[in-house]
Image (tube, rainbow, N blue to C red):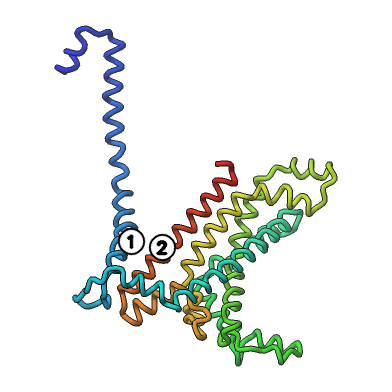
Amino acid sequence: MTSLSTRSAGESPAQNIGYIRQTHRRRLNWTSYLYLVPVFMFVVTFFYYPIGYTANISTLQWNGIGAQRTPIGLDNYQKAVRDPIVNKALSNQALFGAVTILFQMGLGLTMAILLKSRARLKMLYKVIFFLPVVISATVISYVFRRIYDGSTGELNALLIAFGLEGSTRAWLAEPGLALNALMVANIWQWTGFSFMMYFAGLTQIEDELYEAARIDGANFFQVIFYIVLPLLRNTHFSLIILGVIGVLRTFDLVYLTTQGGPARATEFMSTYIFKKGIIEFNAGYASALAMMVLGIALVLTFIQLRAYGRSRGG
């Protein structure tokens, strides 16, 4: 009250009211930051701290259990760069990601365009298409391992039924086929997600654009290439970003079907990290591999976001 009465001595009521509002606003601005404290603590505890802890472990020679930890600097990273299995795992994931993302987007867009037309039982089709997305990866791994079984699998039984006995294979036991078999399983599981994203994007396109294109004489494919695809640009980039992150995180499907075999043909960074850290008790090297995957994910995401910004003129 003293400061207010002192300030009010030579000032008008309007000036005093402005001063009070300004002081109150400062207090509100300060107290509003308190609401961010729980979120900040959550992010630090469950995101930044684990990353920092993993980065620290990556500079140690440690089995992950014992008390003895030997600092070795960047030796784990140097070893990882020279490790041929790391190169094999990265090439497997690059091929896996390129094929699965493109097929999921292409099939998802095709199904969305077809269902956007005057199709009956749209809701039923949506449920059928999206159902694999919500099924557990453990269940999907078991089902496809059963389908691909070289002795009693349904795929070989189907080929025999059509008289194609010579085409039967041990699908998950041959290095040249195992990765392709996993691609099919992944595409089957996640195409429904791309379908829902594209279907949602198609609902945002005004019908007047289609009508104007038809009046100008555009055929079906011209409408797709010159109207639908450009207007779904945001959906394309979103699916690519999510797909790349998903490929880098892929573990359960691979480990529960092939465990990275045969002959490292389906080895991914995630499965290799698991083997090094959990099975071989080499926590330091596994942490270095994990940090490498994190770095790759950040670089790829940055590149994609930059490309997205440039496509929008930013």
Q: Quadrant of residue 147?
A: bottom right
Residue at 41% across / 75% down in the picture?
Answer: 82
Mark 1: which amino acid?
Ile
Residue designated by label 1: 51
- Above or below 40: residue 169: below
At 68% from the left and 45% from the top, the residue drawn is 205
Left or right, 244 with reference to 68: right
Q: Quadrant of the C terminus?
A: top right
Relative to 272, residue 233 above or below: above
Drawn side of residue 307 relative to residue 227, left or right: left
Q: Position of residue 66 (x, y in %)?
A: 21, 78
Q: Position of residue 244 (x, y in %)?
A: 52, 62
N-terminal of the pair, mark 2 or mark 1, is 1
Q: Quadrant of the N terminus?
A: top left
Q: Is residue 232 above or below residue 139?
A: above
Does residue 11 sit above or below 112 in this rendering? above
Tell me whether the residue at label 2 lies in contact with that at label 1, contact meaning CB atoms closer than 8 angstroms: yes
Q: Residue at x 52, y 49 (%)?
A: 306
Question: Residue tagged by mark 2?
Answer: 294
Crowd rating for badge 1 (residues with CA inside 10 Å; few <14, some 14–19, many 20+):
some
Q: How many marks?
A: 2
Using the numbered discs, state the Cα–Cα distance from disc 2 to disc 1 in whole angstroms. Answer: 9 Å
Q: Three-letter amino acid code at disc 2? A: Leu
Mark 2 packing: few (<14 Cα in 10 Å), some, or many (20+)? some
Q: Position of residue 305 (x, y in %)?
A: 51, 51
